[in-house]
Image: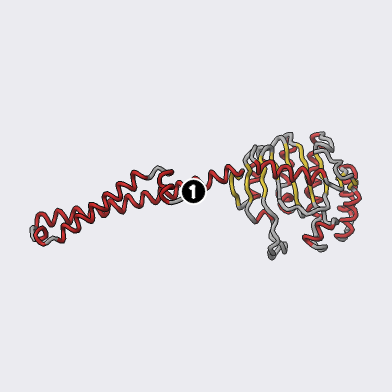
Amino acid sequence: MKLRERIKAYKLRTQVWVAEIMFLIFILSLVAYQIPALRENDVISNILLALFTSILVTVFTITADIIVCYNNHKNEEFLEDLHLFGIQHLHRDKKEVLKCLLSECDSMIWISGYRLILTCELKNDIYDSIIRGADLKAVICPPWSDAFKMVYGSNEKVIDNYLRVFSTINKARKETGKTGKQIEVVFVDKPIFSDTYRVDQNLVTGPYMHNRDPEYRRLMAKDFFSYNIVRKSDLYNIVQTEYETLYSEAKWRLNWDKFEIIHKEIEENDKRESEKIEDFLSSCEEINVMDAAV
């Protein structure tokens, strides 16, 4: 859109016209001030001097107001475009956003991920949500899968995070009497590109990055931007469908009864990471592709 069209669309034409007229008067008064016959008259010269200086200030003020209004309209237009696309809010601190949403959650939680670092930090909030009545579905790319190794290699120590998260979830499951269908964890052997959480009807997602950081050697998804998605938008449907597709193509499902036994055994013995992974895998059941009901 051209500048003139934007000025018309933003309803700034009146201010622009006033600024142009005032600037023209300023030029005329400045020219008149330069006429010797008028300048030699003290009264007229003082009036002209006061006139063009005050008009100049007015022109600057109106111009500044036009610029501010113009930029505000552009910002509103940008935010409206984001909202129409489906983005409700942009965030840098995903943990803070999820903690806030989980504090009122009582219906549904979706989790996704690889190493469950952020999920482990939120495990108590997730526990409280399940106690309030929320069901849970988790789609995880586990350390024994080729997809995980392709992204993070074979040296990541993540099973302790898995044990902390799933033992907390299992505790809530048992206390509420929920079934394995209501509290379900499945594992996929394909890369997960979006770090997606659902808290009731709120979808919060963001990309996984491959930058390195000093502590975890990879930049975590929670360190990059995340965004809430507007319900009933195309973007909401796309992200939801991606998650449901991953879920439907899961290869393993966590058996809670087996997990409880394995978790206790791992806690009682000093085992290496590879042994923990092997034990944890034994608590999972293989499922056929497309068997998982969304």
Residue under label 1, please give it: 75
Q: Quadrant of the C terminus?
A: top right
Of 239 and 156, the residue lying toward us: 239
Q: How is the image coloured?
A: secondary structure
Task: Give the answer, above or below, for where 179 lies relative to 283.
Answer: above
Local secondary structure at mark 1: helix
Q: Count the numbered circles shown.
A: 1
| Image location (x, y in percent) of residue 185 | 81, 44
Of 281 and 170, the residue lying toward us: 281
| Image location (x, y in percent) of residue 159 | 82, 55
Rendering quarter of residue 148: bottom right
| Image location (x, y in percent) of residue 29 | 19, 55
Task: Give the answer, above or below, for where 69 lies relative to 36.
Answer: above
Left or right, 76 with respect to 288, comes to left
Note whether residue 2 is visible: yes
Picture residue at 9% right of the left edge, 54% below the top:
43
Picture residue at 49% right of the left edge, 45% below the top:
76
Picture residue at 40% right of the left edge, 42% below the top:
11
